[in-house]
Image (cartoon, rainbow, N blue to C red):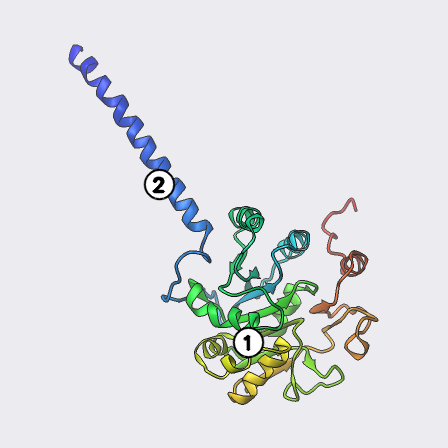
Amino acid sequence: MQRNWLILPLIFPLLALSSFFFFFFFIFLNVHLKFPFISSPSNNLTIIHQTNQSHFSLLIGILTRPDNYDRRHFLRLVYGIQSSSSATIHVKFIFCNLNKPQHRIFIGLEILRFNDIIILNCTENMNGGKTYTYFSSLPTILAAKYDYVMKADDDVFIRLEPLALSLRMLPRFDLYYGFVIPCSSQNPFVEYMSGMGFLVSWDIVEWISRSEIPKTRLFGPEDKMVGEWLKIGRKAKNRYTEKPGMYDYPGTNGKCSHELIKETVAVHRLKRWDQWLHVLDFFNVTRELKAF
């Protein structure tokens, strides 16, 4: 009995040391998982697991600016309540380098809380190469590759399930998808896909990252530049224009606009809150709240 009492003073320090070790390990693991896109690049890409042949993966990158806090939080609600039975869809916000002290702190909080931001190595711009940096960086900064990658504006409402259904039977290779310009055309080969929201298959993402063609054509309307890259590189032999399912908000852009329809995949040019209200009400996004 006396011998057991002599051992007790040794046990308590060991228990305390073990608790500290497990606590430190938990914090380290948690922090590591919170920062997958601003840690060191990974070249060991894996394919996101597909449950069956018709199921696919899609990354939607919303190109926006660090100061657009309210818009980002609103879009988190808009996309956070949606899901798809046809696809694994991840929505991320895309910035260039953060240069202001307040951005480092406030956006750092967003990363810790939501883990939905990708920070690119570029200077913030609209038609000066940000879209190129977005696509060309993905193979080296992502830990997994997707079947499709989409570039979208932050003034577009994308309905994830209709988007997934429209993609389900399309090719997974050499694909270019969106709203073809000019607005009156139904021919996806005539020009290029509107910057409201267009996507390409992963093989095109890899081609953009290694080809010299995009590097010489960075400045100008970003959606038009992407169309030129693919034309010169003889890429995107599989093209699909989602009309009338993608369009600009009624009355905002001539022939690119029409009234809201139930078959909508994406509505663009939502610049004002009353326009967002109209769209969300039309599609009854709060229908699950029976009391409303």
Q: Nearer the viewer, residue 2 or 145?
A: 145
Which residue corresponds to the image point at 73% horizontal and 68% vertical from the top-left? 267
Left/right placement of residue 13 relative to residue 57 reads: left
- Secondary structure under tag 2 reads helix
183 w.r.t. 7: above or below: below
Q: Nearer the viewer, residue 276 or 287?
A: 276
Q: How many marks?
A: 2
x then y, percent, for residue 47: 42, 67
Residues under numbered marks 2 and 1 in contact, where contact means CB atoms less than 8 Å apart: no
x then y, percent, for residue 175: 55, 80
Which residue corresponds to the image point at 74% horizontal and 81% vertical from the top-left? 183
| Image quadrant occupied by the N terminus | top left
Residue 47 seen anywhere in this rendered image of the structure = no
127 w.r.t. 110: above or below: below
Residue ranking furthest to the front: 100
Determine the image quadrant of residue 99: bottom right
* Residue with the mark numbered 2: 25
Left/right placement of residue 9 relative to residue 250 reads: left
Amino acid residing under circle 2: Phe
Q: Which mark is residue 200?
A: 1
Gap in angstroms between the C-alphas marked 2 and 1: 40 Å
Q: Nearer the viewer, residue 50 or 76?
A: 76
- Secondary structure under tag 1 reads strand
Which residue corresponds to the image point at 55% horizontal and 83% vertical from the top-left? 229
x then y, percent, for residue 72: 64, 55
Which of the two labelled residues, at mark 2 and mark 1, occupies the earlier sequence position?
2
Which residue corresponds to the image point at 64% horizontal and 64% vertical from the top-left? 160
